[in-house]
């Protein structure tokens, strides 16, 4: 696929030992409210290899979402280092982090985060538009991904005209648009009924089998069990990695 080859060319130019995609070393995050300091993460060491599917689990307030925000470049660490495919992320400017978020990280949220006033096609097209991809290539990519997630017949439907499961599939397609290094999914089945949740779990399984690197933040034991690797966080520390 032309766009995959285009984006993969930049990946091939980076030296990555053993196919390492994510490397965190001593990562901390402290929230300072002025009166108190809250240590959300207390020195996280984590490596994720190319093509892994990892479930990040733990109770509420354990630091899961904070970790996702740091890996997804939505926030910056207080200390420690973060390398994405061999490139140092720590210390990058806000503009540089925004570029990484658009081109190299695909986000999937519990609440879908789709723009309600535009179609499924246009929602998926947004990252490509911001990425400066030509109109012809955008159209080819969007239609290809819609077919991959089983929504070829929902091209012109707005989110309000879709079921919860269909909206999450649009969100997955949008996450895939720029052929990112990693896919980050935050409670992707949290707002879905049982049947739709199983469909999304099956879709993640297919994406992983196709070679995508996927990190899933979840409270759902059934979804966590689908991941070959499970990392548990408690009180800002990794307590289990298996």
Image: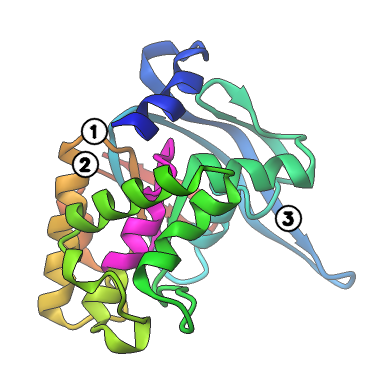
Q: Name the residue under label 3.
A: 30
Tell me which corner region of the image, top left, top right, bottom left or bottom right, holds residue 97: top right
Q: For the C terminus, which image quadrant?
A: top left
One can see residue 186 in this view: yes
Name the residue rendered at 53%, 41% in the picture.
Answer: 103
Q: Name the residue under label 1.
A: 211
Farthest residue, direction bottom = 160
Residue 161: x %, y % from top left: 29, 88
65 relative to 226, above or below: below
Residue at mark 3 to residue at mark 2: CA–CA distance? 33 Å
181 part of magenta stretch: yes
| Residue 224: numbered disc | none
Tell me which corner region of the image, top left, top right, bottom left or bottom right, holds residue 1: top left
Which mark is nearer the camera, 3 or 1?
1
Which SS class for mark 3?
strand
Residue 19: x %, y % from top left: 37, 18
Q: Mark 2 points at which residue?
A: 208
Segment colored magenta: 169-186
Farthest residue, direction right = 34
Which SS class for mark 2?
helix
- Of mark 3 and mark 1, the one earlier in the sequence is 3
Q: Do the residues labelled 1 and 2 touch (CB within 8 Å)?
A: yes
């Amino acid at each position: 696929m032309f766009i995959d080859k285009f984006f993969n060319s930049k990946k091939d130019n980076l030296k990555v030992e053993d196919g390492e995609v994510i490397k965190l070393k001593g990562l901390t995050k402290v929230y300072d409210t002025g009166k108190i300091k809250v240590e959300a993460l207390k020195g996280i060491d984590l490596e994720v290899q190319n093509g892994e599917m990892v479930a990040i689990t733990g109770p509420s307030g354990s630091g899961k979402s904070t970790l996702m925000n740091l890996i997804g470049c939505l926030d910056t660490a207080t200390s420690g280092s973060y390398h994405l495919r061999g490139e140092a992320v720590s210390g990058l400017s806000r503009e540089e982090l925004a570029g990484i978020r658009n081109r190299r990280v695909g986000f999937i949220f519990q609440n879908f985060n789709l723009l309600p006033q535009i179609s499924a096609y246009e929602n998926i097209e947004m990252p490509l538009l911001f990425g400066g991809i030509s109109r012809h290539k955008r159209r080819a990519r969007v239609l290809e991904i819609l077919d991959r997630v089983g929504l070829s017949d929902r091209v012109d439907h707005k989110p309000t005209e879709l079921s919860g499961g269909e909206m999450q599939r649009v969100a997955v397609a949008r996450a895939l648009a720029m052929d990112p290094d990693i896919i980050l999914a935050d409670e992707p089945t949290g707002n879905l009924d049982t049947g739709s949740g199983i469909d999304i779990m099956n879709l993640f399984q297919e994406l992983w089998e196709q070679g995508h690197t996927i990190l899933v933040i979840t409270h759902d034991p059934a979804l966590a069990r689908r991941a070959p690797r499970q990392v548990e966080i408690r009180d800002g520390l990794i307590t289990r990695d298996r």
